[in-house]
Image (cartoon, rainbow, N blue to C red):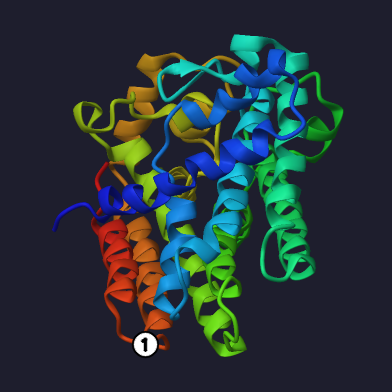
Amino acid sequence: MSNPVDLLVEYGKRVDPVMEKYLLRNTHPDFADAVLYPIRMGGKRVRPALTILSALAVGGKAEDAYPAAAAVELAHNYSLILDDIIDHSELRRGLPTVWKKYGLSTAILVAVHYRESISEALNDTRNPRVFHEEMARTIKLLTDGERLDILFEQSGREDEPYVVDRRYRRVTLSEYLEMVEKKTGVLIETACVFGGLSVEGVEVKTLDALREYGRNVGVAFQVSDDIIDIFGREEKTGKKVGGDIKEHKLGNIVILLALEELGDESILRRILTKSDVLWEEVSLAINEIKKTGAYNKAEEVRRKYTRNALAALERLPDTPYRRMLEDLAIFIEKREF
């Protein structure tokens, strides 16, 4: 099938000027380049596209969802700015991260600026109080998802007492799914709910269907990312495989499921707990993973969540916009890059 993400991009890009409007409000000219840099680094704009499509799928107008869609994408970028600081990441989408380009202090200020721009965008929605409450909940859950992802790392951050004291040495599938629902699923869930909330007179059962779709498709998307990180092809993804192994992550479903089979004395466990993992060791770990049933088990989880997402959409009217949401779920189920 064709890539439905390409079509989503066309919808998502509509919010770029809307985001710029909020970001540049009350902004000193000398700060404008740094403030606009994150949204000019690229990105597919899937989340704002989901907000717009969700509004259209329940009988609304695209324009009515623009402030909410802008807020969702600003929240996504807000989280990425902080993620890159937390993970000391120097590149994103092939470009220097905000902190690497402008410095740590400036990156923190840019993140604060984004958080307030989110609030300004939500002030222009149909029911600001409801939107603000939903966004506050979303950011708190997203933060907790990031916290869990850090605690799932098997080495590193030795200068951070909270992490060292609370690091998970074992992670269950249910703990992984809790982390993913918070770190990835909740913002995609909110993107869809915001679309519904942008439409006057939308019913609670419709919002529930959008929420369920977004949460499930968000988890499926992250499971896909995890599968691709271990089994993807570099010529398709543009990234070296096994990055999560190099970063000691047990918050990857494939690594988690493989370790359940291989045990604590395995080569994979020893590599994950090393202070510095070489790429040669990453290749060795991937070969160990390939001996297990982790790939098939992860595929089953991905399929379960995409099927749940499709089932939720059956409660919406059958329109071309609903079918676009369905196409995205089907694409994620088969995604290889």
Q: Secondary structure at mark 1?
A: loop
| Quadrant the C terminus occupies | top left
Residue 2 on image: x %, y %: 15, 54
Work out which residue is located at the far left of the displayed protein and give it. 1
Residue occupying the point 80% across, 18% down: 159
Quadrant placement of the N terminus: bottom left
Q: Residue at x 65, y 11 (%)?
A: 102
Residue at the image position 55 percent from the left and 46 percent from the top: 73
Q: Is residue 326 above or below residue 66?
A: below
Res. 176 in view: no
Whether residue 204 appears in this view of the structure is yes
Q: Residues within 10 Å of mark 1 (few under 14, many from 20)?
A: some
Depth check: give the residue in front, 52 or 228: 52
Q: Where's residue 178, x and y in %?
A: 62, 60
Residue 329, above or below 258: below
Q: Amino acid at mark 1?
A: Pro
* Residue 161 x, y percent position in the rendering: 86, 28
Quarter residue 314 falls in: bottom left
- Residue 309 appears left or right of 237: right
What residue does disc 1 label?
A: 317
Residue 200, percent across and down? 59, 81
Q: Residue at x 37, y 87 (%)?
A: 317
Q: Quadrant of residue 196?
A: bottom right
Count of numbered circles on the image = 1
Name the quadrant containing residue 130.
bottom right
Task: Please say if 181 is above or below 152.
Answer: below
